[in-house]
Image (cartoon, rainbow, N blue to C red):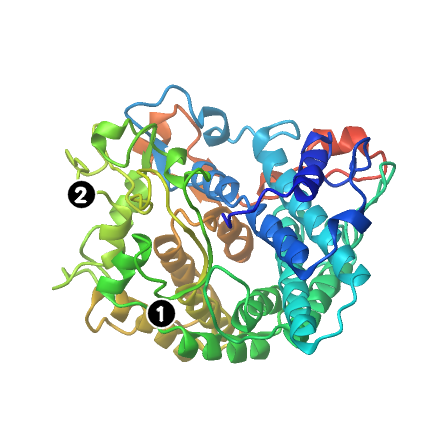
Amino acid sequence: MKKIIKSLAIAAITITALQSCNDARDINQDGVISDEVVWETIEDLQLGLNGVYAAYTYENDINFNAVFTDNIKRGIDNNGQGQGLYNFNLIPSTSAATSIFAGRYAGINYANRVLEGVEELEFEDEATIQEENHIQAQLLTLRAMYHFDLFLYYTEDYRAPNSLAIPIMDYVPTIDAAPERNTVAEVLAFINQDLEQASQLISNTVGSNFYINRNTIRAVQAKVALIEGDYPTVIDLTDGLVADYPLSNQSDYVDMYLDLIEGESIFTLSRQQDDSEVASLFYFNTVELAGNPYLEVSNGLYNELEPSDIDGDLQDEEDIRFDVIIHPETQIVNTNSPENIILLNKYPGSQEPLLNDIKVIRSSEMLLINAEAKARSNDFAGAAQAIKDLRDVRFGEATPLPTYNNLDEALTDILEERRKELAFEGKRFLDLKWIGGDLNIGVSRNETDCASFSAPCGLPRSSYRFTLPIPQAELNANPNITQNNGY
């Protein structure tokens, strides 16, 4: 996370919010330092912005998307970790329901507080005004991203404009605020408004992938436009992004996950010493067999990645994603053997054994979104070429051009490609919710994998559990909010 200089004022805001029983609401407590004291200089605003970046606790997404779906199995040193979630035990009081909701609204709360500071401060010199505008643009983009994440997890039907989505928080709420959820149309309009304003204020097109720039905004706009069905906009934005961020070749792809280069990453969350360790979601100690793995890669995903097989024939070069995802100390006894030990290697450690930066948006995801938008526009040849372009780079050689005769064939292949490309990056559950909803594909686990947890092997896409419940803590504090169906 971005290192934050510990000014007492910034710390007071953070502590006040964290001590609240609800990060999105209970914020006016005794001892709060007033905004007039907190926001005095442009440096204060930058410190506040750093805190908003630091609030992006994406590890919760990675854990939930991995454990709830089909990409992990019980590890050899598992003592019950993930058992309930793997068994689809998803109720309003579980941490899975609470962590994403509370974490994102905490980030929104911090963003709104700093935006209040932006409104209050007035600068005279042009350079400082531009710096303030750049800070405001990043805050608006992060606020939009937090809202969009919440929208994806807690909205039942993305395509029903008048159905309930999530509460919009574009203000610092009072302790007695109790908002009902806004509609799908309202939330998407709000997100687009924040992104559009940010795009007008941002000062740079490119820069470090640890910070928001104009291309980051375009990437988020493309993801929102896909949900809205605005496929020409999706194609236009993603064409430009893939051109600006060429896919990493095999060597660079490995180095990117070692945090040696930025590679094709458009937006990455920096993780430094003393920050949360993403590999600790899977290992107790170190990323190796001796590191006590308690969650392992599923046999199902391993079988998808094993060197063979786009068209049924062995390839001269293996898919580099196999090397990135599958640790070299993996032990395969036999196909789908319960004795297979399949170790995760995607977060191999950089500054510390379990610590890695987290790639949130990459060029390959933009290419996959491009393929999906073309498929949904009945450009099946264009969708096939996009998938081939991705496979060519990952295999390091020319691969067969797929053939799609209809939308279902294209979406099925895109969904499978997303599973391999975006594994353990916090996407799988949402992919099954979105694309799986069109294909009636839910969670379908390898029998050996589900047996490792004595868990069900499938969850039909019709299940209400493909939308997260409003957390019980929020229901207790907010009598006006409506729970999702089934909970």
Q: Is residue 147 above or below residue 410?
A: above
Dot 1 surroundings within 10 Å: few (below 14), some, or many (20 or more)?
A: many
Between residue 255 and residue 481, name the one nearer to us. 255
Whether residue 152 can be seen here:
no
Residue 391 drawn at (x, y percent): 29, 67
Q: Amino acid at mark 1?
A: Ile
**In the displayed structure image, the side of residue 67 where residue 336 appears, left or right:** left
Q: Amino acid at mark 2?
A: Pro
Name the residue at 39% across, 53% down: 419
Whether residue 219 can be seen here:
yes
The quadrant where residue 414 appears: bottom left
Name the residue at 59% across, 75% down: 203
Between residue 83 and residue 138, name the one nearer to us. 138
Between residue 102 and residue 399, name the one nearer to us. 102
Q: Earlier in the sequence, mark 1 or mark 2?
A: 2
Residue 439 drawn at (x, y percent): 50, 56
Residue 464 drawn at (x, y percent): 62, 40
Residue 64 drawn at (x, y percent): 49, 39
The quadrant where residue 486 appears: top right
For numbered disc 2, what is the local secondary structure?
loop
Between residue 33 and residue 327, name the one nearer to us. 33
Name the residue at 23% across, 64% down: 250
Tag 1–tag 2 contact (CB < 8 Å): no
- Residue under label 1, please give it: 387
Of the numbered discs in the image, which one, if any, rests on residue 328? 2
